[in-house]
Amino acid sequence: MAATDVDVFSNEEKRSLNLGGHVGFDSLPDQLVSKSVTQGFCFNILCVGETGIGKSTLMNTLFNTMFENEEASHYQNAVYLRPRTYDLLESNVHLKLTIVDTVGFGDQINKEDSYKPIVDYIDTQFENYLQEELKIKRSLFNYHDTRIHICLYFIAPTGHSLKSLDLVTMKKLDSKVNIIPIIAKADTISKTELNKFKIKIMSELVSNGVQIYQFPTDDEAVSEINASMNALLPFAVVGSVEEVKVGNKTVRARQYPWGIVQVENEIHCDFVKLREMLIRVNMEDLREQTHARHYELYRRCKLEEMGFKDTDPDSQPFSLQETYEAKRKEFLGDLQRKEEEMRQMFVNKVKETEAELKEKERELHDKFEQLKRMHQEEKRKVEEKRRDLEEEMNGFNRKKVAAETLSLSQPLKKDKDKKN
Amino acid sequence: MSSGVSESDLNGEIMELQKNLEGYVGFANLPNQVYRKSVKRGFEFTLMVVGESGLGKSTLINSLFLTELYSPEYPGPSHRIKKTVQVEQSKVLVKEGGVHLLLTIVDTPGFGDAVDNSNCWQPVIDYIDSKFEDYLNAESRVNRRQMPDSRVQCCLYFIAPSGHGLKPLDIEFMKRLHEKVNIIPLIAKADTMTPEECQQFKHQIMKEIQEHKIKIYEFPETDDEEEMKMVRRIKDRLPLAVVGSNTIIEVNGKRVRGRQYPWGVAEVENGEHCDFTILRNMLIRTNMQDLKDVTNNVHYENYRSRKLAAVTYNGMDNNKNKGQLTKPETSDSMSPLAQMEEERRDHVSKMKKMEQEMEQVFEMKVKEKLMKLRDSEAELQRRHEQMKKNLELQHRELEEKRRQLEEEKNTWEAQQRILEQQKLDASRTLEKNKKKKIF
């Protein structure tokens, strides 16, 4: 789907020429249309609203079908999104419709994070498309586009004002998706209350800076009807799949003791207006806005996050290849650096510990030396003692020997004396 | 009004369920919305004409678009020949039935006119590639708003009506460009051949095109039987033999475009005279959008994937030098960004593992060292104990010996004293005896 804009070439010389007959390129729009009809269309609706507010009923009413849906309980721990895809056919137009339901919205006691699963889901669809777009071998023309084209925000018919959950959620969503706020179960509000309610809601949205979807007024064919519808937002809708006989017709309606609320009666509710705007007039514009605005914003933010930027328009033209290469070099350098850092950290750790251990070793060595000296000292003492003892022993032995020799010689003397 | 609904279960598989759409929902209006928006946006088309000079290219373009695209002020390529082959473009804005068309005609003055025409296709290839590159860059910008599409969506290749077959230059050109642009070969100045000659010529050309495996633009298949019949009839008449004319002549009361000869008028829009009408219908009235789609979905994507694969291949080369793992099989199905992401994840896990390993080795070494120290300490302690015991033993020994010595000494001294006493007694007795003797 290459976006083309004729005014882009205004800086080049363009000659306007007159045709001398019927060339036939006025069939170009038909060629384009027949191509897209053959391919089939894709449309994705996100319904955000409390449990039991009438989301499934409204979808059934809008598309005249009973989409299979179990009723959700009020006891979900957290909000989760439930997408369902259907293949619809009308005349020769194939529509791949995906309806995404927010299950459990508004049921928790703490609703601070209720918007997160919704934002995550929308971002995931953008991310999937972006990944496909960035692939080397890609097939965009038969890619199943799951990006949300429209978010129908169901407002509870309190008659007073928006709930803070509503404001918080819509503020988080308004830059990511086209939002159309609708007042659900509008058959519980009277006409006068309804007008006041609508005015209050719109002023609250404006004062909180919530950007809701504006039906486009730039195409003369539809600008009038779109402008008038813009003034009637938010639409007050009633949904019903039950048929009631009114007069001699059978219409979809809700039967009360006090009367019958007819879904397709414009006096009773704005259902017809919603269907007209959403499906019959602006479906294509919703798809375009999603692609050209919301997706581009997501893509720009994502790429900037990853560090891509456009070079100056005046300098060398931006080359994807160079950017990828540069990015890659940077990235690999980064990895390399991290590796080096880790290694370095380890080297330091090892050095530190080595020093510690060396210190311990040294202490041990010193201790060893000290003990050795002690031993030497003791040994010396013992040696001294031994020497002393030995000396004594020797002295004593000498004494003994001397005494012996003396006593030996003495008896001789005695004998000598006796002889005399 | 046929209607049906099929539903997909949680796994996303589509099951066929026939349901009735009661009443009119209204999305059948989508095509009208698309129609409206496309008319508002306007259309553009880039057409390239290639062929030797004098083959009637400018005249044909003027005839096709019924306008003075080429005129004395804006001369055709044959009048603008320079020394080398040029690739030049001119843009015109035309309107019909509320539909705006910005038509870019790209021509190649000098193509095939030199004596040595080697590589005269190169400027053409370079031009087409540069337009692809411009589009790729515009598409890859972070801030992208208007994406001007100047990619060449169709190339009319003019074959000289020699009557025999394709020239080597024709074959060479088509072989080199058939995978970059939709080629529609045309036999120029078809009014120089009789129908039989033309038929033979066409047959020969198609044979040669098939022999050389040249892929010329193919008409899309349709489910419609009627349309398929027409498509097949056109296929039999390829390549189209055309005649162009800037002059309007009166024939049988009708004003027609044609070429006046002494022997008659060759009418441009007469299906029996030439295939011009078929060309115009096919090029402009039925297949213009398809030409754009094929350029966008096939030729451009080929260029893009080749260009981006070269980038990642270079990156992978760097990786190989650093000794890291690469995954060449999956690079085709992933975008470079996703690839980098995967590489980053791989690296993180590798680093973790490396860190763990290093930690392990470190711990082990430290433990070893500590154990060694402890062992030395224990050893030391043991030895110290041993020595102490030893010394104590020696001490005790010495003490024992000393005690013994003392004992011995005491005993001996006691003995000596007794002996001494005896001696003393003996000597005293002797003295006494001596004294007695004297008297």
Image: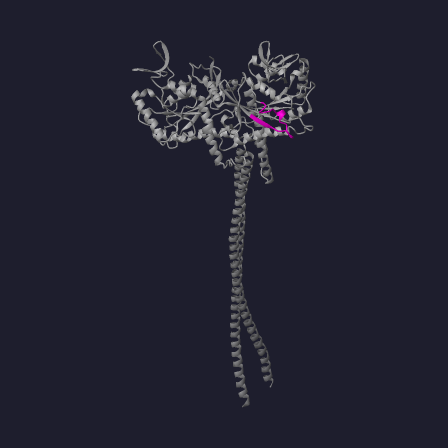
Q: Residue A329 in the image: x percent, y percent?
A: 55, 39
Residue A273 picture quarter = top left
Q: Where, quadrant-wise, is the C terminus of chain B in this rendering? A: bottom right
Q: Residue A306 in the image: x percent, y percent?
A: 49, 36
Front residue of this view, candidates A145 and B388: A145
In the displayed structure, B380 sits above or below B111; it is below
Q: Looking at the image, can residue A144 be seen?
A: yes
Q: Quick check: B171 left or right of B368? A: right
Q: Looking at the image, can residue A190 be seen?
A: no
Q: Residue B304 in the image: x percent, y percent?
A: 57, 29
Tell me how many marks there are.
0
Front residue of this view, candidates B134 and B305: B134
Where are the magenta residues, as a range? B70-90
What is the magenta segment's predominant secondary structure?
Answer: loop
- Residue A156 sits inside the magenta stretch: no
Residue B49 picture quarter = top right
In the displayed structure, B177 sits above or below B279; it is below
Front residue of this view, candidates B28 and B209: B209
Front residue of this view, candidates B415 and A388: A388
The residue sitting at 52% across, 64% down in the picture is A378
Q: Quick check: A399 left or right of A79? A: right
The residue sitting at 52% across, 72% down in the picture is B409
Q: Residue A400 in the image: x percent, y percent?
A: 56, 74
- Residue B79 sits inside the magenta stretch: yes
Residue B293 picture quarter = top right
Identify the image's colour scheme: rainbow, by chain, secondary structure or one colour: one colour
